[in-house]
Image (cartoon, rainbow, N blue to C red):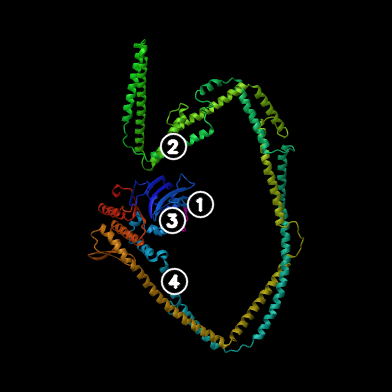
Amino acid sequence: MKLLSLYVDNFGKLSNFAYDFKSTLNTVYEENGFGKTTLAAFIKAMLYGLTKEERLKYTPWTKMTGFGGYLVYEVDNKSYRVERTFSPKRAAFDTVKIVDLETGTEEKLKDEIGEEYLNLNEESFERSVYIPQKNLEEGFGSDIEAELANIIGGTDDSQSYNEAMEILTRRSEDLLLNTKKGIIVDKKRELFELDSELSESELVIKAKGETKRNIDLIDAELEFLEQRRDIVKDQLVEYTKSQEKKAKLQVITKYDNDLEAAKRAVSENNAVFNGNQVTLDEIKEARNKNRNAQRLRFEYEILRKNVKVPEKYNELTKTYNKDTVPTDEKVEDITRKIEKYKNILSVIEAHRVVPKEDKPVFGIVFTALATLFLVVGLLIGSFYFYADPFMVENTLMYIMIGGGILTASIICYIMAFIGYRRTLEKNTNKFIGGNVKAYDFEKIQLEEALREFFGKFHLYSSNFQANMEIVVTNTEKYKEYQKELIESQAGNEELEKKIKSLDNEIQHFLSQFVIDSVYISTEERIAELTAHLNAKEALEAKLAEAQKAKDSYVKSNELYEISDIEVDVDKINDELKTIDDKITDQTNNRAAYVSKLKEIERESSSYTTMKQKKSSLETEIKQLENEHRILNLSMKYLNLSQTALLEQYVKPMKDSASKYIKMLFSEVDDFSIDVNFKFKFQTKAGLKELDSASAGYQAAISLCMRLALIDCLYPKEKPFIVLDDPFVNFDDAKLGLVASLIKKISKKYQIVYFTCHESRKF
């Protein structure tokens, strides 16, 4: 799997960031704070999504609706693009889309992308091909050995061996922990007790019939007591319900008060309408008429004061007229083009470099020649009119000479324009790099269209946004002056008629309602009517709610039927206590007889039943002892099998690690890797643990072991490797060796290497 390119719309501190990957070594060298770790996290997020903690960490402050981007990658010589948008709130709102770039169709995957193509879950990805700084700093002697053993030894179910051993050990200890504890010991103790019971069961039980008769008599009395208790309880329950309903009748007074208050509010509000029906649309129509009347009065005042519209209007018509004034659609179109032009400039500016500009030599030369021809033509023309005014016979000759010079001048100006244009395009291409060159042609087209549009209004500034504001302002003024001019020419008589007609309609409408009009304006009367109409629905809803609340309270508490029950509560409680005491005494007596009967029946059971139980118990003890022996054998062979499985990976790991270690350390002659993937190196004093070496040495060995792991995990399809500045503890000598190592393996694996220091830039 190879990475081809990515684009970050918004992710953490990164925004509008694009990057194209090479198939070998990709070094991302930026200062601290740029967002290198964020970019590495973005790659992982495109493959596996975000955890809850990562979502909180990488949600941008400036874009809360969603963030993300896309990643283009290649698998089996086919290119795909994964597009993800992450929600700041929760993963349920995330979106993901995978597109086959060859066919343009959307792909459907069962698992996350990393699991589908790399055959790695997110945790295994971080423990193999993703190598951050902290991982190597911890060294290979901490938790990395266990992680490697889990990845290689356990594959997808890495804990199955430990879980199986734990289950077997726990079951073995349950069966026989020692000579005093365990299921087998308990069963043998039970067998001993059973032998004792058999020896004592010879007693003959004679009181069985009398005990049964006593139990029957007690059952009959208990049945009578239970029936009487139910009758007394029912009386007490009915009396309690009756008293509760009587108490709740007092609460209903509050509901009645609320209902009456709601009715009064509805009545007072409806008094304004004076029995007339009105809608919000009718009130809105009256308000519009009043505002139209106010507007007409304002226009009438303007016309009455003889506003000097013609001068301003005539000044604007030099540029703005019915042919040049842009429509609303045209304004929207030019506004979109300006916005698009600004976006293209932003993209170009983000990738701009500052090369040396080429001089327009070609354009300058032809400009000079065109100017020279123009001057010569003017001199010849002057000579014709002043020096030789009567030489009519030479007129044709002068015209031909002047025409030839003028034609040459025009040709030179055209060539100069072409020269300037080519120099401008060449310099523009220099200023635009990478994929931004694709925007250049569209920028030029937009610029020409905008200059052509604003040229109609004699606006030649490159600030198209300011030009647009001038055009919109002058257009509005032109339309306003034109409207005022027409209306002023029409005269005031028509306005007076309209104002009077509107006022009559408004006053006729408002006269239907009871609104005090002495101290408030017509607009305020309309506003008050609107407020009463808006309040009408709310007040009626409140009235209905109060009625519903009262009805619901009455229904839920069954207040429409109340029984008048009078009982002696103390007498009922005393009778209940007496009945409960008798039931308790008889229940205890019955339990004693039942216990005695069970004991008699148990003692009178036959020897055959007890012997069968003894035989069954002896068989069970033998089976448990056999199970204990099989469990011990299973643990023994399971341990041998796991050791053999891990040993078959030790040699490939050691061979691969040895290849990388020899590239970095000439002084390491020999080392060992045990079945738990612990690394030890040979010294004169013997084998030493890796944690006894320096941090830089441990990190280097950890890198080699990680690369060896990747070789073992991916013998065919090669993954990409992400290195997030893991060499901070390396000295200059080891950095040089690591740089050589990284460059060599980049021919085999695609490397994405992040660093912030010049000395670690490969």
Give the residue type at disc 1: Phe
Query: Quick one: which residue is furthest to the front in this view?
Result: 393
Query: Quick one: which residue is furthest to the left in this view?
Result: 684
Locate residue 134, reporting x and y percent: 35, 55
Task: Provide the residue span drawn in magenta.
Answer: 106-113
State if disc 1 and disc 2 touch (CB < 8 Å).
Answer: no
Locate residue 271, reporting x and y percent: 73, 38
Q: Secondary structure at mark 1?
A: helix
Q: Which residue is mark 1?
A: 93
Find residue 686 and report its image quarter.
bottom left
State if disc 3 and disc 2 touch (CB < 8 Å).
Answer: no
- Residue 107 among those drawn in magenta: yes
Give the Cα separation between the discs numbered 3 and 1: 18 Å
Give the residue type at disc 2: Lys
Locate residue 201, reporting x and y percent: 56, 87
Q: Which residue is mark 2?
A: 342
Up-down relation of residue 757 to residue 525 (above or below)? below
Give the residue type at disc 4: Ile
Q: Secondary structure at mark 2?
A: helix
Residue occupying the point 51% across, 33% down:
331
Residue 237 numbered tag: none
Give the Cα separation between the discs numbered 2 and 1: 32 Å
Residue occupying the point 41% across, 66% down:
159
* In the displayed structure image, the side of residue 440 where residue 511 appears, left or right: right
Up-down relation of residue 225 to residue 433 (above or below)? below
Q: Which residue is mark 4?
A: 167
